[in-house]
Amino acid sequence: MTWVSVATGLLLFAGVFFYAAGTVGLLRFPDPAARLHALTKADHLGLAFIALAAALEWGSVAIAAKIAAVWLLAIMAAGTSAQLMARVTRQDHSDEP
């Protein structure tokens, strides 16, 4: 077993842990803003760890650059979709007394 496979395993474990933490936050937090915050923050970290594991396992700079580009696009998409969902939720709840 090499150090690369050990590091890849640890990074994958960390990524899965953060994905699970985000899911728990989504299911357990009381209001939509807290749910979105928990989900987006934890998923960003989870994706980062899994992307690092994939880049380390494949060991190519070109592949690592592509993985980094996908990660950045996912961060932008998650932030944008969280803002849109928060705006809709806010509009829906503004009618309540």
Image (cartoon, rainbow, N blue to C red):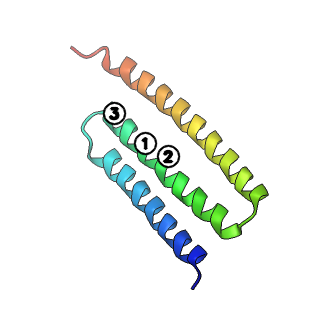
| Residue placed under numbered mark 1 in the picture | 41
Location of residue 31 by image quarter: top left
Q: Do the numbered discs 1 and 3 sit on residues whose CB atoms are within 8 Å?
A: no
Marks 1 and 2 sit apart, C-alpha to C-alpha, by 5 Å
Q: At which x and y percent is residue 65?
A: 73, 51
Q: At which x and y percent is residue 41?
A: 43, 42
| Residue placed under numbered mark 2 in the picture | 44
Between 89 and 78, the residue placed more toward the observer is 78
| Residue placed under numbered mark 3 in the picture | 32
- Residue ID at (45%, 41%): 40
- Residue ID at (64%, 40%): 73
Marks 1 and 3 sit apart, C-alpha to C-alpha, by 14 Å
Instruction: Name the residue at the left extreme.
Output: 97
Report helix, strand or loop for mark 3.
helix
Of marks 2 and 3, which one's residue comes earlier in the chain? 3
Marks 2 and 3 sit apart, C-alpha to C-alpha, by 18 Å
Q: Quadrant of the C terminus?
A: top left
User: Looking at the picture, which amino acid does disc 1 mark?
Assistant: Lys
